Image (tube, rainbow, N blue to C red):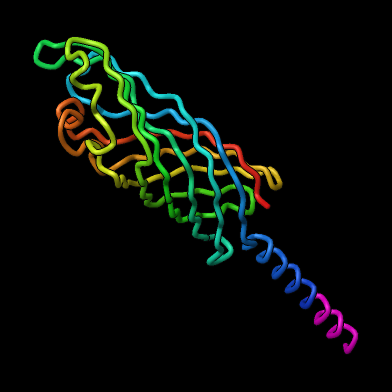
Amino acid sequence: MKNSIVRMLVASVLVSSLSVLKISAQTTPRTGIKGGLNASTLYLDNVDDRNERIGFHVGLFTQIPVTSFFAIQPEIQYTTKGVSANYNLLGNTGKNNFNLNYVELPVLATFKLGNSVDLQAGPYASYLVSSKVTTDGDFGSDYRNINRDNFNTLDYGIAGGLNIYFGKALLGLRYGQGLQPVAKDGAARLLMGKAKNAVGQVSLGFAF
């Protein structure tokens, strides 16, 4: 009887230890780098054709565990956004290329499916670092003077996606939808109206 009790206690200790190790593995903080491709667009009025801008993003992330199945992931990344669009405004036609470049700060709620799959959603805020607009059409050079001052410096929105880990390597898919109109005033506002950023990302990364 005594030996049975001892064996039960030893088994209980082993099971508890394994459970603690498992939870610890699932709640280990992650910090890493990532980068990849962007396909971005702006939902513009008065356009006959719109093509995504193919760009890139690169940045750092860290994952802060809260429980064994939930974490907060703040990031900082440099990301390109924009669109190429043919316009038809009051009978005037042409093509505009909007190239917008941001430093972005997402803060994502992360729901962990084991230690290999993360589902994420949360807000982001972006700071416009630079912009370049090129125009070819009936408006001629009048709109080539659109500069950073014609755009809202701050962009914000929501993002969501999926990360899959292969050991320390990761593959990520994400979509971000802006909530702030990109154009602030002047020619940019005339051409873009209340258009907002939208971008899909495919990332490759490595966690330390």
Q: Is residue 8 magenta?
A: yes
Q: x, y (%) of residue 65?
A: 56, 63
Q: x, y (%) of residue 83?
A: 34, 25
Work out which quarter of the rendered image holds the N terminus and state it: bottom right
Q: In which quarter of the view is residue 81 placed?
A: top left
Q: x, y (%) of residue 13?
A: 78, 78
Q: Main secondary structure of the magenta part?
A: helix
**Residue at position x 45%, y 38% from top?**
79
In the rendered image, the vertical position of residue 48 relative to residue 198, given as above or below:
above
Image position of 104 (left or right of 61) = left
Image position of 2 (left or right of 113) = right
Q: How many marks?
A: 0
| First to last magenta residue range | 1-11
Q: In which quarter of the view is residue 107 placed?
A: bottom left
**Residue at position x 36%, y 46% from top?**
127
Q: Is residue 175 magenta?
A: no
User: Residue 182 or 39: which is nearer the viewer?
Assistant: 182
